[in-house]
Amino acid sequence: MPRRVLSGLRHRRNWAQLVRFLAVGGSGFVVNIAAYTAAIHLVGLDYRIAAFVGVVAGVSNNFFWHRHWTFGAREGHAGFQAARFIVVYGVTFIIGLGILQALVEADTARVLAQVISQIVITPLNFIGHKLWSFDHGIVRGRRGRSGR
């Protein structure tokens, strides 16, 4: 494990931030699963396309709340943060899509498979957003240690 991650595990404020991340993520998760389920059952989309619809709906909710509440990165440029945020979600979406497809091909119910894939990628999202999307050192134009 990288030294920065191990160091971060020792700080109480990082654990509080993780709780906020999970709360926001929980609301985004509900939005994601609702949009995914509607796209499959009401619109009749393929589960892979429905997964994309769910992620777009969830990401829209999560960016605002993570920026303002979870990571307190309001002073950074929202456009740059949004671009990094989308890259992190794009990478984890691809990973989650692979998990989803493997589970569906193993005869797991499509909605349950989406739930499982989203749970599996959550730690990757947290680390990506904490260390890159909303990192205060990057946000303020500094690399390296960000004073946290």
Image: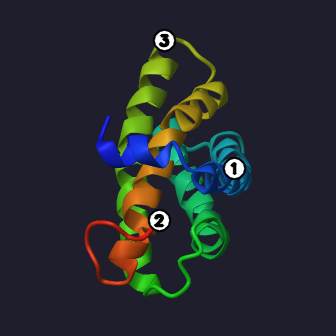
Q: Where is residue 136, by image quadrant? A: bottom left
According to the picture, the residue beneath numbered tag 1 turns out to be: 19
How packed is label 1: few (under 14 Cα within 10 Å), some, or many (20 or more)?
few
Q: Position of residue 53 (x, y in %)?
A: 55, 54
Q: Between residue 10 and residue 115, name the one nearer to us.
A: 10
Q: Position of residue 20 (x, y in %)?
A: 69, 56
Q: Between residue 140 and residue 32, name the one nearer to us.
A: 140
- Residue for point 44% across, 74% down: 82
Estimate the spatial distance between the alpha carbons at disc 1 and disc 3, rounded to whole Å.
Answer: 32 Å
**Circle nearer the N terminus (2, 3):** 3
**Circle nearer the N terminus (1, 2):** 1
- Residue for point 41% across, 68% down: 135
**Circle nearer the N terminus (1, 3):** 1
78 sits to left or right of 59? left
The tag on residue 109 is: none
- Residue for point 51% across, 88% down: 75
Q: What residue type is disc 1 on? A: Val
49 sits to left or right of 16? left
Q: Between residue 125 and residue 33, name the one nearer to us.
A: 125
Estimate the spatial distance between the alpha carbons at disc 2 and disc 3, rounded to whole Å.
Answer: 43 Å
Instruction: Indicate whether 23 appears above or below 59.
Output: above
Q: Nearer the viewer, mark 1 or mark 3?
A: 1
Q: Position of residue 144 (x, y in %)?
A: 27, 67
| Element at label 3 | loop
88 sits to left or right of 68? left
| Element at label 2 | loop
According to the picture, the residue beneath numbered tag 2 turns out to be: 148
According to the picture, the residue beneath numbered tag 3 turns out to be: 106
Q: Nearer the viewer, mark 2 or mark 3?
A: 2
